[in-house]
């Protein structure tokens, strides 16, 4: 379920450059597999339908992380282990995207005394860790990438924030021309 935006698409190249700059130069995470994964995630989540792609068996969009693992329907032919791996990877992607790119959307609300930003960080780390343990040798992305996303989640959040700053600077530059 990767992005329909191919590797040669200008938007994908923009994300790749911004991710490489932020992660390799500023954050210090110099793993091409990791930076490729993150650029792909940004390209995939350009489409809001991809951000909110999980649905219940009644075709209701699932927007709440707490409901994702319990209620998501992935269709027939998906084994229990594959379902758990795919859902945990998606939860990791979803929470990393929101905490890194749009953290302000999580801060203002406190549901039942829970800080949503901290809850998303905890859920993302946990989910990537589970997905890495359930990933087989032939699965993509490799288990080591998912384990790194779990172990370095906070650094990835910071790096994605820097990517957002970068694309906002580019946008301001285009607006003044």
Image (cartoon, rainbow, N blue to C red):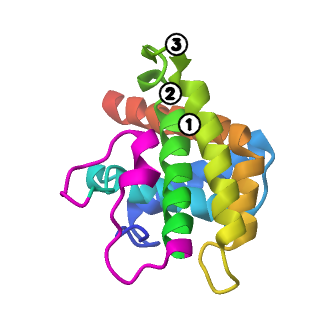
Identify the residue under disc 1.
100
Out of 140 and 80, give the one closest to the viewer: 80
Q: Secondary structure at mark 3?
A: loop
Identify the residue under disc 2.
103
The quarter in which the N terminus is drawn is bottom left
Q: CA distance from mark 3 to mark 2?
A: 18 Å
Left or right: 6 as drawn, with respect to 38: left
The image position of residue 123, as x and y in percent, is 59, 41
Left or right: 120 as drawn, with respect to 66: right
Image mark count: 3
Query: Would residue 24 be seen by someone viewing this image from the given angle?
Result: no
**Badge 3 density bin: few <14, some 14–19, many ≥20, Cα 10 Å:** few
Residue shown at 26% from the left, 54% from the top = 49
Task: Please tell me whether mark 3 or mark 2 is closer to you in this view.
Answer: 3
Query: Would residue 110 be seen by someone viewing this image from the given angle?
Result: yes
Residue shown at 55% from the left, 26% from the top = 117
Q: Are marks 2 and 1 in contact (CB under 8 Å)?
A: yes
Mark closer to the chain start, 3 or 2: 2
Q: Which residues are magenta?
A: 57-81
Identify the residue under disc 3.
113
């Amino acid at each position: 379920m990767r992005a329909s935006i191919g590797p040669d698409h200008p938007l994908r190249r923009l994300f790749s450059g911004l991710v490489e700059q932020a992660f390799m130069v500023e954050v210090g995470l110099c793993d091409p597999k990791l930076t490729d994964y993150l650029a792909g995630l940004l390209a995939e989540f350009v489409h809001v339908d991809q951000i909110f792609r999980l649905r219940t068996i009644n075709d209701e969009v699932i927007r709440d992380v707490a409901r994702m693992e319990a209620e998501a329907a992935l269709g027939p032919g998906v084994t229990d282990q594959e379902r758990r791996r795919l859902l945990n990877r998606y939860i990791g992607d979803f929470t990393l995207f929101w905490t890194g790119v749009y953290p302000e959307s999580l801060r203002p609300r406190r549901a039942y005394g829970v800080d949503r930003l901290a809850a998303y960080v905890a859920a993302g780390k946990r989910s990537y860790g589970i997905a890495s343990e359930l990933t087989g040798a032939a699965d993509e992305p490799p288990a080591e990438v998912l384990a790194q996303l779990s172990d370095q989640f906070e650094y990835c959040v910071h790096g994605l924030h820097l990517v957002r700053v970068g694309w906002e600077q580019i946008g301001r530059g285009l607006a003044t021309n």
